[in-house]
Image (spheres, grey):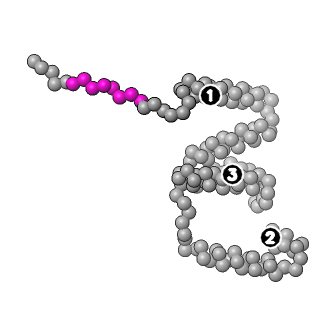
Amino acid sequence: MSSTYSHRPTPTAPDRPGLPAWVRYGFVAALVIVTSLLLAHEITSPDVRTMQILLAGLLVFAALRVSSFTTLLFIALAIPTYKPTTYGGTTLAFVLVLFILWLVRLTLKMERPAGRTSIDLPVAVLFCAYLLACSQLESTEELRGAMF
């Protein structure tokens, strides 16, 4: 009796470009060890600035993994604000981080570019009217009151 079974070789994983596997594993192990030592140090004697930096790094890492809308919602809930509107400080910094993350996603084609909407023209007209109103101010001291 003849067998109709033919031997097929098992597929192997393709070679990955870049660093060898042992270097990548060594890098990940070193990163885990350093992070765990830093976290252990922060648990025993916490430092506010170090915790802020660690949380900001975690926030940026998470922001690259999820959609921009989810990132915006997360930041709106995660950042404690002491007053409803803040000009400058941490709020401005996080808005700039969001903008840079959006630009990175846009250039890496991870996100669809912004398109035209039906409210573009009214917003442009409103902005031009605002600029025209600011150009009618008589002194630079009045500009601060008009802006904020």
Residue under label 2: 147
In front of the other: label 3 or label 2?
Answer: 3
> Which residue has dot 1 on it?
27
Tell me the quarter of the image containing the N terminus: top left
User: Tag 3, which secondary structure?
Assistant: helix
Q: Which residue is mark 3?
A: 97
Q: CA distance from mark 3 to mark 2?
A: 23 Å
State left or right for residue 132 relative to residue 65: right
Residue interval drawn in magenta: 6-13
Residue 95: horizontal and vertical position, in percent?
70, 55
**Residue located at (65% from left, 29% from top):** 31
- Mark 1 lies on a secondary structure that is helix
Q: Earlier in the sequence, mark 2 or mark 1?
A: 1
- Tell which circle, 3 or 2, labels the residue nearer the N-terminal end: 3
User: In the image, is residue 40 above or below residue 114?
Assistant: above
Whole-number angstrom distance, CA of label 3 to CA of label 1:
26 Å
Report whether residue 143 is seen: yes
Main secondary structure found in the magenta portion? loop
N-term-proximal mark, 3 vs 1? 1
Q: Nearer the viewer, residue 22 or 142?
A: 22
What amino acid is at disc 1?
Phe
- Asked whether residue 42 is drawn in magenta, I would say no
CA gap, disc 2 to disc 1? 49 Å
| Nearer the observer, 113 or 46 | 113
Residue 47 spot, x, y in % from top left: 80, 35
Residue at disc 2, secondary structure: helix
Query: At 25% from the left edge and 23% from the top edge, which residue is drawn?
Result: 7
Query: Which residue is outermost to the left?
Result: 1
- Mark 3 and mark 2 in contact? Answer it, CB < 8 Å: no
